[in-house]
Image: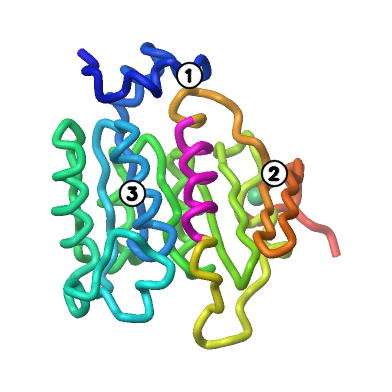
């Protein structure tokens, strides 16, 4: 039974009452609780995904505050997932929210994602994204990549073996040359919003849009339909002949 809480959202024909009820049965795992992950968690909890786990072993630092909206100065030094779990649970008690204060590794990732209907990328690490990509392909779990760098953000939903995977597009992903990734403070919120739309579309059984690229400084938005690379070492069927 859906309460009035979602009334304005169920009026959206792309979702509707049926879609809202479907979202309430789904489980999302968000890996990373920083600039992107905290915004995505906040939006997905409010939008009514059934249960959400947020995994991160980091603590809130003053340098996080310019690009997040949940954390305050009082949270500095505390576990990000502890804060997110408590605060977001109070936003929507109908959603089961769990903050898990652990580092995701190749050894433990399966234990976190085995019941996931979708994995939401809130990391800022290419190796961790490749790990998510690998577990997604192995166990047929869709995931939604998102990244931010300076004034540009990228989002791509991955349906394993159906759409291009992260490795297929990896050469197009710019890596930060700095030790600390430069990010304009308002960018993660908008990229997380796009990521949440792709997440909900996947949970509704819809096709993700492709690789979305948004430059917030120049107000340029592009969607690239990147085909699966048949020679992709992670999802391709063909072996490269040198
Ligand atoms: Zn691939």
In the displayed structure, would residue 168 be above or below residue 228?
A: below
In the displayed structure, would residue 82 be above or below residue 236?
A: below
Kindly tell me whether residue 106 is visible in this rendering. Answer: no
Mark 3 vs mark 2, foreground winner is: 3
Residue 48's x, y, as percent? 30, 31
Q: Using a 10 Å C-alpha cutoff, classify the residue at mark 1 as few (fewer than 14 neighbours), some (14 to 19) or many (20 or more).
A: few
Comes first in the chain, label 1 or label 2: 1
Identify the residue shown where x is 52% and y is 87%. Answer: 179
Marks 3 and 2: CB-CB under 8 Å? no
Identify the residue shown where x is 31% and y is 17%. Answer: 21
Residue 178's x, y, as percent? 58, 87
> Disc 3 and disc 2: Cα gap in Å?
35 Å
> Disc 1 and disc 3: Cα gap in Å?
21 Å
Q: Please give the residue where the numbered disc 3 appears in the rendered image.
A: 41
Comes first in the chain, label 3 or label 2: 3
Observer-nearest of 211 and 221:
221
Q: Using a 10 Å C-alpha cutoff, classify the residue at mark 2 as few (fewer than 14 neighbours), some (14 to 19) or many (20 or more).
A: few
Observer-nearest of 211 and 109:
211
Kindly tell me whether residue 128 is visible in this rendering. Answer: yes
Q: Please give the residue where the numbered disc 1 appears in the rendered image.
A: 12
Residue 217's x, y, as percent? 68, 64
Identify the residue shown where x is 40% and y is 23%. Answer: 9
> Disc 1 and disc 2: Cα gap in Å?
40 Å
Mark 1 vs mark 2, foreground winner is: 1
Looking at the rendered structure, the secondary structure element under dot 3 is helix
Q: Is residue 73 left or right of residue 211?
A: left
Looking at the rendered structure, the secondary structure element under dot 2 is loop
């Amino acid at each position: 039974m859906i309460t009035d809480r979602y009334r304005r959202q169920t009026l959206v024909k792309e979702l509707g009452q049926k879609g809202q009820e479907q979202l309430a049965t789904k489980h999302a795992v968000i890996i990373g609780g920083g600039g992107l992950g905290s915004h995505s968690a906040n939006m997905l909890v409010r939008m009514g995904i059934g249960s959400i786990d947020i995994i991160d072993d980091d603590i809130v630092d003053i340098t996080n505050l310019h690009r997040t909206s949940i954390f305050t100065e009082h949270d500095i030094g505390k576990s990000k997932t502890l804060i997110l779990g408590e605060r977001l649970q109070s936003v929507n008690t109908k959603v089961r929210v769990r903050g898990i204060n652990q580092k995701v590794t190749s050894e433990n990732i399966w234990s976190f994602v085995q019941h996931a209907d979708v994995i939401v990328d809130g990391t800022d690490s290419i190796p961790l994204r490749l790990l998510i990509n690998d577990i997604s392909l192995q166990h047929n779990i869709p995931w939604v990549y998102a990244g931010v760098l300076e004034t540009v953000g990228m989002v791509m939903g991955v349906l394993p073996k159906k759409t291009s995977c992260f490795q297929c597009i990896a050469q197009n992903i710019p890596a930060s040359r700095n030790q600390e990734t430069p990010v304009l403070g308002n960018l993660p919120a908008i990229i997380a919003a796009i990521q949440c739309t792709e997440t909900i579309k996947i949970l509704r059984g819809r096709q993700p849009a492709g690789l979305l690229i948004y430059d917030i400084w120049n107000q340029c938005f592009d969607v690239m339909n990147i085909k699966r690379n048949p020679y992709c070492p992670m999802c391709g069927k063909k072996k490269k002949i040198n």
